[in-house]
Image: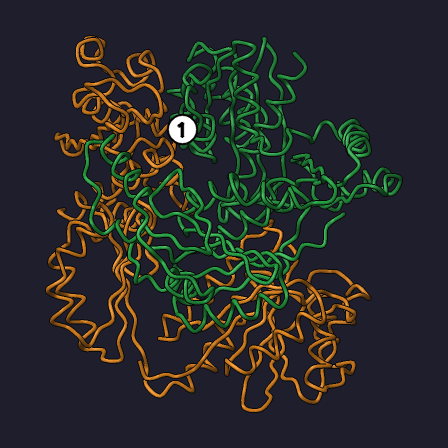
Chain colours: A green, B orange
Amino acid sequence: MGSVMKIGIIAIGNELLSGFTIDRNSAWIGQRLLEIGLKVHVKKTIADDADMITKSLDEFSQDCDHIIITGGLGPTLDDITVKTLYEYFGDNPVFDEEYWKELEKRFKAINMKVPTLNRNQAHTGDKVKMIDNSFGTARGMHFEKDGSNYFALPGVPKEMEGMILSYILPHLEEKLTSKVHCETIRTTGLPESILQEKIVDLIESNKNCDVAFLPHRMLGVDIRLTTSDHKSLLDLKDQIVNRISKYVYGFNNDTIEAIVADKLKEQNLTVATAESCTAGMLSAKLTNLSGSSQYFNGGVVCYSNALKRDIVGVDGDLLDKYGAVSEEVASELASKIATKLKSDIGIGITGIAGPKGGTEKKPVGLTFVGIFYKNNVYIKQYNLTPNRKINRQLTVVLCLNELRKLLEKN
Amino acid sequence: MGSVMKIGIIAIGNELLSGFTIDRNSAWIGQRLLEIGLKVHVKKTIADDADMITKSLDEFSQDCDHIIITGGLGPTLDDITVKTLYEYFGDNPVFDEEYWKELEKRFKAINMKVPTLNRNQAHTGDKVKMIDNSFGTARGMHFEKDGSNYFALPGVPKEMEGMILSYILPHLEEKLTSKVHCETIRTTGLPESILQEKIVDLIESNKNCDVAFLPHRMLGVDIRLTTSDHKSLLDLKDQIVNRISKYVYGFNNDTIEAIVADKLKEQNLTVATAESCTAGMLSAKLTNLSGSSQYFNGGVVCYSNALKRDIVGVDGDLLDKYGAVSEEVASELASKIATKLKSDIGIGITGIAGPKGGTEKKPVGLTFVGIFYKNNVYIKQYNLTPNRKINRQLTVVLCLNELRKLLEKN
């Protein structure tokens, strides 16, 4: 992979140890580093405690050449992390007139005076490079000692992420001997093992690429390709996508709802939903994005048979004959909701989410999705899991993937 | 707090370092420990690497008396963690005939043969106590060395959690010199700082209790009371709940939707929803729980004005005169959906979720919730944030809290 950098992360914060805050920052940093071909060597979480900070810096300096410290950059100079870092690197903080003026300017722009407390954040030293903070007042700090680099960042995700993207990644990339390329193929609808089986020969004949399978519980699997050979990457990517195109909904940071939304907007189509077991989850997902009223008309959460009949307009005889969880009712839900809500596409969902309510003929997990489009209804039957939460989430993702495939045929 | 135990967590797994898996296990363990009054001293995440494991065990054995290791207990004996642990503690794994028979029995019960690979999990040693796994085949391991205890657990959350609850917590509690009591008061509707101000005098006059404020982003704040003095705990809890009862929706692991669901079932009431900006999120939340059809009739996701008028039955003149995001329309949505869906309670939600669509008179974040019940409509107006995701989630929680308050008056 062309790199021997050893990167360590020290996360500081009592709330991380007590479990009230889940450490998503470290995971985010790990992902960004992997995208440029770097791996985190070790990660440690400690309390806001000067001794622990000093001890961890000593320890990490032996193993790592780049150390990223997150958390603990509060607004007071007494803040243990800042103070400990200045001491550790033998630096002496002095007031930074220029940054103070900058802060005054920023606050003036929103008609406020800088709180006096923020004076403490307007300090700098001889041995530290300050890292700009586009989203807050606490600047990051960059020290160098014995050839190792130490970056101290705030714990606030947005502020931390800004500094990683604008300062630390460029710093690391400059040192990389070869550029590493990374591409993620996002799939849904097949478990990891079967996906792997389907493409194992392609992977074996492209030894230049590192391939990792990254399942998101049961909702999908990402296939991540990493290599310094850009041509190999593109070749393998094409081969994989051709082989399993039915299951590929996007690349890198694409979400399935954004992909579907783009296609609906491109094709100037509108959607309406009639949801039973998912009870609004599909509608909520389709409206996650700003501007969703362009393609989403609305829906009915038809939890009871009466609503399926009276509001959506499903034929009562069908409900009696086949039951609410049936191909026939999913089909009616889809076509009737499209008509009723004057939409190009109608989606009907009915299933037994569980954990109760299953029978021998219709077990928990049995789910039907109907998609009405251009006078046709496409029906899918799924036999999902015993778990209510997973069944509901999975149905939404599987349904969005069917819609994606349908729109791609257009 | 009566305890000087020093607890360390070592999480093993490449996927934790690369950020593909967020380390929720450590957070979960931290919370369970805090509930019995123990704090995690330090936490380290390392790769599946024998040297790193050995080094970390050496390091932690100096600082900690109880070390919990998670991850890396795969089905093969070659698995690095298992092998390294046997070596580290100078133990020699031998085949465990009894456990193998137990596995055979378990698999037979589901009409399967035990895969040969699982033979590797049927090992034990002289110096290890095996920890039962109720949810899988890989048992945990408990070693003692120089007065310190080492627990190795699988990384699969359910399996790890089972072992913590059934084996490790009882083990730790036995050693606690005094029982620590812990109670969480769950609130929503007030930011942390204002909540704190409202009860600071109560906290100051009950010095026996440790009080922590734990905000869940903007959705609510938990107040956690910890003490060894049970009477103090109950006194302070009562005082706080009396002072801020409007904002208290439950205790400990209560969720607001479960509290509301219980009250609806108790009072034999049904709910229908008409959601605009939240687009199904409230319905989805109300149906998170099995058996929700007992109290939830259904809803309409009325994203457009046409739907509000044609499906829900909102007066078109009101829509023209006041606009979709108004007290008047929220009120009509609530009362009309209750009638239409023959429900005791109707909930109407309309708002400008953002980030676009705001005007000077009706800025992003403006949201109205109407609740129809017994011929009255209760209206709440909120001025939320510029953030679409937060506004939608917050509206659902605020709305459920209003519903809770209304049901408590009954």
Inspect the image, locate mark 1, and give the three-letter code of the amino acid beneath it. Answer: Val
Residue B213 image offset from top left, x and y in percent: 27, 59
Q: Tell me which residue sits at (46%, 22%) in the image.
A: A273
- From the viewer's perspective, tell me whether residue B230 is left or right of residue A58: left
The answer to which image quadrant residue A235 occupies is top right
In the rendered structure, the residue with mark 1 lies on which chain?
A
How many residues crowd around disc 1 within 10 Å: few (fewer than 14), some, or many (20 or more)? Answer: many
Question: Most extreme residue toward the right, as rendered?
Answer: A205
Q: Is residue A200 above or below residue A9?
A: above
- Say which residue label 1 marks: A301
Residue B111 versus residue A100 in the image, above or below: below
Residue A127, percent from left and from top:
46, 56
Query: Relative to residue A79, is residue A375 depicted above or below?
Result: above
Q: Position of residue A266 (x, y in %)?
A: 55, 12
> Going 58% across and 9% down the picture, which residue do you hit?
A375
Q: Nearer the viewer, residue A56 or A120?
A: A120
